[in-house]
Structure formats: C-alpha cells, structure tokens
Amino acid sequence: MADFSQLYISLLKPEALSSEMHYVATEAMQKPYAGVITAPVWTARVATMLRGSGVRVASVVGFPHGANKSTLKAIESTSTIKDGADDIFVSAHLVHLVSRDYDAIRGELLEIVKAARSTRRDVAIHVIVEAPLLLSLGADRSEEAIAVACRAVRESGCDGVVSASGFHRAGGASSAAIDALKKHGEGLAVIAMGQIANASVAQAFISGGADRAVVDPST
C-alpha cells in the first residue's frame, strides 16, 4: 500500500473549480495525504472540509512568481493563516534569488515570518526558491545562489525550502534541484514541488532525498 504520509496534494491552477477543490480535499482525506495546498481564495473552505481529519491545510503566498511587495506578502500570510492554514508556501522574490542578495532575501522573509508567527506561533513556513532557475545560472553562480537562498531561508526562521512553483519556464522539481537543496539546506525540510503529476513520482523524490513532496494532479 502506498505511503502518503510525506506527500501533499495541491490544486493551484487559477481556473480551478469548486468541484475540483472538493475532489482534491476528499482525496486527501481518503489516502490520507499529509496536507492539501491551495490558493488563498480556497483556504477557508478547505480548512472547513478538513477539520478534524488530521490533514494539514497549506496555502501559497505571493504565488507563483513572488513579485508582490513584502508588505503584501505579510498581509496575505496573516489573512490565510486566519482562514485556517497550518502551513504557508511563500514565493520568494526571484530578483533577489538570482542576484544572490542574502540581505534582501532574508529581509523579505523576516517581515513575512514576523507577521505569520504573530498570527499563529506554530505555523510552518516554507519558501519556494525556483531551484531550476538558479541551477541554470551557470556553474560559477548556481552553487552560490542555492547556498545563499538556503542560508537566508534558515536564518530568517523559516522551516523548509521548496524546489519550484511549477509555473516558471525553468521547470519543476528535479533530482538535481533536490540534491542541491539537500547539500545547502541543513536544518531545513527539503520539499520537492513543481510538475509532479502523481504519487509514484512524488515518492521517487522522497526516495531520492526529499523530506516531502507535492503532487499536482492537474500537471
């Protein structure tokens, strides 16, 4: 029997219908998955559906490209946590990641962490760093970019680092991305996310070293 205890299931396409969200939440309870990842607009409804099931509710922030101002990301974090999110998946600002600007990455995340933890102390905060994009920068820059991203995530008080949104042209989760995040992500949960179509592929990432993985059936 397949083990879903380290897997999340997501429905993040912008045109997702209520019936599709209901299906994903039901699927998460039946398996059961560790959690459901949803857009903020669905968080309250999914939290109501999953109440008492033991399945975690996760919501995305600044998704998918991270281009919102940090103040807006902080507000979105607070709002979605109040709606019932146990975890938030934050899209970091890509310009800071690509330029390897540790202070800017950490500064943005600190603002989000402060707002989130003042709303709910035990909320889990994971950061999407688009590792495939960083790995495309070239041998002389990619290693440093991954290392800086992981350091900023860790030292801002976040809990996990996430491979990809699945919405960037650089691609989704990959073995190379997970290997790089594991190398530099000491103390962080490493989460494989991005264009993972089913549980079998997700579990292969777990076997390959990821701590958790996210299934996106709409891929």
Image (spheres, rainbow, N blue to C red):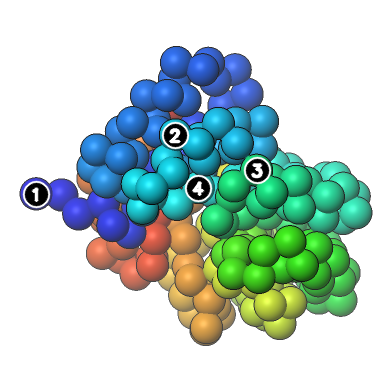
Name which residue type carries label 1: Met
* Mark 1 / mark 4, whichever is N-terminal: 1
Q: Comparing marks 1 and 3, which lies closer to the viewer? A: 3
- What residue is rendered at 37% in x and 24% in y? 23
Judging from the image, what secondary structure is the residue with disc 4 in? strand
Q: Comparing marks 2 and 4, which lies closer to the viewer? A: 2
Q: Is residue 22 left or right of residue 170?
A: left
For the residues labelled 2 and 3, the Cα–Cα distance comes to 12 Å
For the residues labelled 2 and 4, the Cα–Cα distance comes to 10 Å
**Residue 130 tag number:** none
* Mark 1 / mark 3, whichever is N-terminal: 1
In the depicted structure, whether residue 150 falls above or below residue 15: below
* Mark 2 / mark 3, whichever is N-terminal: 2
Name which residue type carries label 2: Met
For the residues labelled 1 and 3, the Cα–Cα distance comes to 33 Å
Q: Comparing marks 1 and 4, which lies closer to the viewer? A: 4
Residue identifier under label 3: 83
Name which residue type carries label 3: Asp
* Mark 2 / mark 1, whichever is N-terminal: 1
Q: Is residue 63 visible?
A: yes
**Residue 57 tag number:** 4
Q: Is residue 163 left or right of residue 39?
A: left
- What residue is rendered at 66% in x and 30% in y? 41
In the depicted structure, whether residue 74 falls above or below residue 15: below
Q: Position of residue 38 (x, y in %)?
A: 55, 38
Residue identifier under label 2: 49
